Image (tube, rainbow, N blue to C red):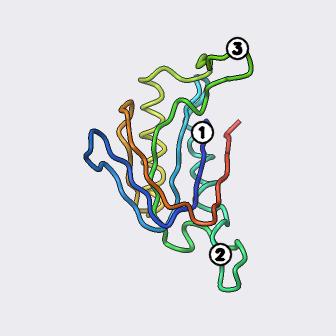
Amino acid sequence: MRAVIQRVKQSSVSVLGKCSGSINEGLMVLLGVEKNDQQKDAEYLVEKIVHLRIFEDDIGKMNRSLIDIKGQMLVISQFTLLGDCRKGRRPSFVAAAPPEMANELYLYFIEKVKNKGIHTETGIFGAMMDVSLVNNGPVTFVLESA
């Protein structure tokens, strides 16, 4: 499982011009599910992401987590994170999980985040989405469960 996380002042996602999720201060998470991923991969990433100290404290040092600041999370499924561009000119998606499995783990990830008491918004799995964000910093990290 691969996640790109961005610290945001605000972020939203819309499908066909209709907003499906919007947050204020927190994290926007783009989530890709690989074919060998299991629930333990989602659990690992949830724990890592919500406790990662990437928000500034009173002296400007990255020392607070999403939980510490009572931040929000916008989770968007993005299978293109698993595109392998090393050979040729067209990405290969052989590592990506089939849609049914990917959606199941995507929903599991969201459930685990919500269970942490974090206000969580989402995109729509499999839809063509327009994503907006104000990246704070900018601060962006790539995390993998493997």
Q: What residue type is labelled 3?
A: Gly
- In this rendering, the count of numbered labels is 3
What residue is disc 2 on?
Answer: 56
- Residue sitting at the far front: 89
What residue is disc 3 on?
Answer: 88
Disc on the earlier residue, 3 or 1: 1
Q: What element carries label 2?
A: strand
Give residue 7's quadrant in the image: bottom right
In the drawing, what numbered circle is on residue 72?
none
Pair 2/3: label in front: 3
Give residue 81's quadrant in the image: top right
Disc on the earlier residue, 2 or 3: 2
In the drawing, what numbered circle is on residue 40?
1
Pair 3/1: label in front: 3
- What residue lies at 57% left-to-right and 73% top-to-bottom? 68
Pair 1/2: label in front: 2
Q: Could you say where residue 25 lies in the image, as x and y percent from the top left?
A: 48, 68
Q: Could you say where residue 102 lies in the image, as x and y percent from the top left?
A: 48, 29
**Of 40 and 133, which appears nearest the observer?**
133
Q: What element carries label 1?
A: helix
- What residue lies at 27% left-to-right and 39% top-to-bottom? 16
Q: Which amino acid does label 1 sit on?
A: Lys
- Residue sitting at the far bottom: 58
Considering only vertical position in the picture, is 80 above or below 31? above
Residues at marks 3 and 1, CA–CA distance in whole angstroms: 33 Å
Q: Could you say where residue 106 lies in the image, as x and y percent from the top left?
A: 46, 38
Residues at marks 2 and 3, CA–CA distance in whole angstroms: 41 Å
Give residue 58's quadrant in the image: bottom right
